[in-house]
Amino acid sequence: MKRLRVGVIGAGNVATTAHLPAYAKLDCVDLVAVCDSSRDRVQAAARNFGVPHAYTSWDELIRAGGLDAVSVCVGNKLHAPATLAALEAGIHVLCEKPPALTAQEARTMEEAAERNGVILAYGFHWRFTPEAEYAKAAALRGELGRVYSGRVQALRRRGIPGWGGFTDKAASGGGALMDIGVHMLDLAMHILGWPEPASVSAASYAELGTRAGPGLMGSWDPGRFSVEDSLFGFIRFADGSSLSVDTAYALNMGPKSVMNVELYGSQAGLSLYPLRVYGESGGQLSDLCLPFPGEPRGHAECVEDFARAALSWSPARSTAREGTALMELVDLLYRSAELGQPVEPGRP
Ligand SMILES: NC(=O)c1ccc[n+]([C@@H]2O[C@H](COP(=O)([O-])OP(=O)(O)OC[C@H]3O[C@@H](n4cnc5c(N)ncnc54)[C@H](O)[C@@H]3O)[C@@H](O)[C@H]2O)c1
């Protein structure tokens, strides 16, 4: 059986907790190389996961040759350059979320994958949770009827990341929406089948991130906080359906973080985490409760899906086209928030 020769670009948090352990467990994969600009970090990762080759740049890793596929696990602003370098060398790529800083970058990545005849997938691992798989199948079977509205929530009370470049707009492209909102927005769009957006409005804020205060995910510098700490959006689709998007790193809300998608259909409604289906049965209101375990959250399944797609040259669950479509929505949400008025796709 052919095996996939894999490299990992970036040896930080997501690489060492999700990608490297997931590849290391796959029989169909040889972990060949890893790179990180930090020599200490890359050497530790190579040692811990038994990777024979360690480099301090992705150029060296790619130039050394012999790779079929890479995971891109560096910060957001490096997604496009690292991914493009690999794609142009004919290497399949699983790039971490968000796909890129802008829709234009994501489009360039999509075109490069097409031109080089290789797969580009994104690390939207929530799609692989049993709840998401159930919801997608239920929507496809028509059990929800016509889904005419929905709600995306990615909310933390005080969850501003205290590491990496997450609070720096130049490094990350944005704050809560780019980092956590994209997961739930991607999931909702995946289940809904990517309806065409018609108009988007949003408001964003930086009320809590720009002043000192308690943090539950480390400390940050409020003087250098250049992203939104919360964003509230509303998307109308061309088919008349709609979706609200609420996301926050910090918000004066209840103590429990929320990552959830709710869908409201003509036959039934659905809330993903925990999974509940709300409808009618025998003339009564009925609630269906499905006891899924809650953890793990699909990282290993996402990596395996990509590896199998790359081996068989078949599409992965998350595609380059969808990555571009998602970033088009993100661009519209940010543009509306900046202008303080609704915006439409394709209009300046
Ligand atoms: N899917 C998820 O749930 C999930 C979770 C965490 C992070 N992420 C995404 O993964 C990416 C990385 O996040 P993280 O938390 O692992 O960050 P991190 O800061 O822990 O890791 C990034 C690594 O990239 C290295 N690096 C920086 N510049 C480099 C370069 N030019 N060449 C090679 N290596 C370089 C850094 O030294 C660091 O080790 C981000 O885009 C983030 O959004 C996704």
Image (cartoon, helix red, strand yellow):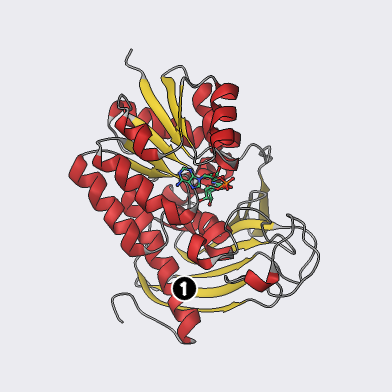
Q: Secondary structure at mark 1?
A: helix
Quarter holding residue 208: bottom right
x and y percentages locating residue 25 in the rendered image = 53, 21
Q: Residue at x 33, y 49 (%)?
A: 320
| Quarter of the rendering occupied by the N terminus | top left
Q: What amino acid does circle 1 point to?
A: Leu
Q: Nearer the viewer, residue 131 or 267?
A: 131
Residue 238 is left or right of residue 270, and the answer is: left
Residue 240 is left or right of residue 291, and the answer is: left
Name the residue that disc number 1 marks: 333
Q: Nearer the viewer, residue 345 or 78?
A: 78
Q: Nearer the viewer, residue 24 or 192?
A: 24
Residue 268 is left or right of residue 68, and the answer is: right
Which residue lies most toward the left here?
115
Quarter holding residue 300: top right
| Quarter of the rendering occupied by the C terminus | bottom left
Q: Is residue 309 above or below residue 2?
A: below
x and y percentages locating residue 323 in the rendered image = 38, 54
x and y percentages locating residue 90 in the rendered image = 24, 36
Which residue lies most toward the top here?
1
Q: Is residue 103 above or below residue 240?
A: above
**Could you tell me if residue 262 is visible in this image?**
no
Q: Residue at x 32, y 36 (%)?
A: 92
**Could you tell me if residue 114 is visible in this image?**
yes
Q: Residue at x 64, y 48 (%)?
A: 275
